[in-house]
Amino acid sequence: MLKNKPDIGQKVAGCWIFLSLFHINISAGSSGKGWQSQDDKHVIHNNQLDLREIVFVLQSQSNSFHERQAERKRADLLKQAHSLAEKPPLVLLLHTLSDNEGDWSILPLLPYLSHSFGKNSSWIVFLEEETNVKMTQIIQVLAKYDKTKEWFLGKPLHDTESTIIHHYAFAEKPSVFKYPDFAAAWALSIPLVVRLANKVRDEPLKSDFTIDLKHEVALYIWDNGNGPHLTAVPELCTEPEGSPQTSHCATTLSRQPPLCGEPVDKEDVFVAVKTCKKFHSERVPVIKKTWEKDALYLEYYSDHADPSIPTIDLGVPNTERGHCGKTFAILQRFLSSSVPNTKWLLVVDDDTLISLSRLQLLLSCYDPSEPVCLGERYGYGLSQGGYSYITGGGGMVFSREAVVRLLDSGCKCYSNDAPDDMVLGMCLNALGLPVTHSPLFHQARPEDYARDFLAHQVPISFHKHWNIDAVAVFNKWLKDDLTGQTSDGLHKSAKTEL
């Protein structure tokens, strides 16, 4: 146990959380001071940019697989710098910069970046693990922009319709607001970092929930029109490395998903589906028509035992929301002799659409002897000492070791209808166990995400049946044919050497 941590049961029992969605209004005519508008043409500077003026921040994670990935990326960047006979840039691994759980949300990290690099650097360039950088080109790209001005550079994404994951921001015209695709890399000039850092220090960050970080960072920088818009940089690309259309690109992507060995066997994964009597005839048939056949071990857990499905009644009454009691009963059953002894537990909702074959592929990268908690990461109160959690609708994956540590800790629900994913996040935080993020899990429907964001993914899951044909969505986005190709033509034969 970590020192100076409150009792986990007490910490959970005292925490009631209410989320209110909000609308954000914008004024099309607003403009900021101290920065160039997107309509202004930037000055192309002839002076060379020194590599030592660039600080690369790898958005790394505290997990053995991701740490290895990040170290490889850092080694590649330094090797390129050496080949250019340049003194190397700083390459930082985000997960090592401090013990602050909220660092992955970037904004709490800005004061550190400003203090440490504000005097001797010109740019902070953020990369994801799969982002490949061509050092010569990235220097040429950044040299086009006046480093004494405020710049927010990236590959722009936009919503085609207002979406819950962005709190229905810009509901009248969602496409008006641009935010960066983190996979392509994105950059902040030091003058902007310094100003934002002062703002973070002087004004407490307001958002309780971190849901879609790239959108929320862009909103914070834009600051209701008082700050810079995202400037589109065509050289920041998300095409696969080696593609013929990438000759102009300063960044490309490693092919996804990675294959770190043979996909884990079906007998290594136990699938738990949370349902209730009122959805037995509505949602369960969708699972049976789509992905149930791909599971060797799967059980449906309900408030009513229905032998025709079949479902298992865990003795926990159904709740309209939260479902914490049911989830913890599932965790206890997973460790019991009532189910097969498997390495991995997948917990999903009855309206989750998921590709188990792709999950098996992804899990080849992770060590089940470690306490792995994998899925789409959200955050609560990260700027005020909060915690991260795996959002439940996209699917929560736990190694057996993680489940053992969770239950041995005494972690429990403060009520049956407490939010199960958030309670688990609080418990993991108290134990000092990391939540591991994968952008291939999705809490919402495909139409809730930017098209260009999904275009370079081979997704693992989506969630919700609102106003969609769920079977058609599965067949389009998650069904694989016998050639190892997804139905929309994306290959999944990539390999990452470990």
Image (cartoon, grey):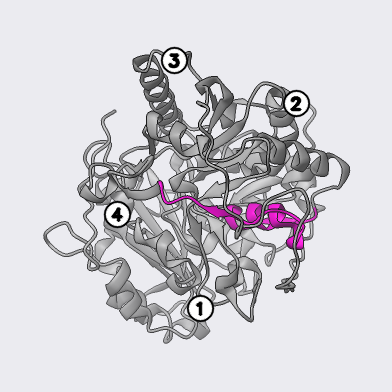
Given the current orientation, which residue lies at the most extreme right position? 202
Indicate left or right for 206 with 37 as reference. right
Write down the quadrant of residue 81 in the picture.
top left
Lower sequence index among marks 2 and 3: 3
**Secondary structure at numbered mark 2:** helix
Lower sequence index among marks 1 and 4: 1
Q: Which region of the structure is painted magenta?
A: 206-235
**Relative height, residue 100 to residue 394 (above, below):** above
Lower sequence index among marks 3 and 1: 3
Q: Residue at x 60, y 66 (%)?
A: 177
In front: label 1 or label 4: 4
Question: Of 98 and 295, which appears nearest the observer?
Answer: 98
Identify residue for label 1: 304
**Relative height, residue 300 to residue 426 (above, below):** below
Residue type at the position of mark 3: Glu
Write down the quadrant of residue 110 in the picture.
top right
Residue type at the position of mark 2: His
* Labelled disc at residue 358: 4
**Secondary structure at numbered mark 4:** helix
Would residue 217 be counted in the magenta stretch?
A: yes
Q: Residues within 10 Å of mark 2 (few under 14, many from 20)?
A: few
Q: Residues within 10 Å of mark 1 (few under 14, many from 20)?
A: many
Q: Residue at x 65, y 74 (%)?
A: 170
**Relative height, residue 49 to residue 216 (above, below):** above
* Labelled disc at residue 86: 3
**What's the distance in space between the residues labelled 1 and 4, CA to CA?**
31 Å
**What's the distance in space between the residues labelled 2 and 4, CA to CA?**
42 Å
In front: label 2 or label 1: 2
In front: label 2 or label 4: 2
* Labelled disc at residue 115: 2
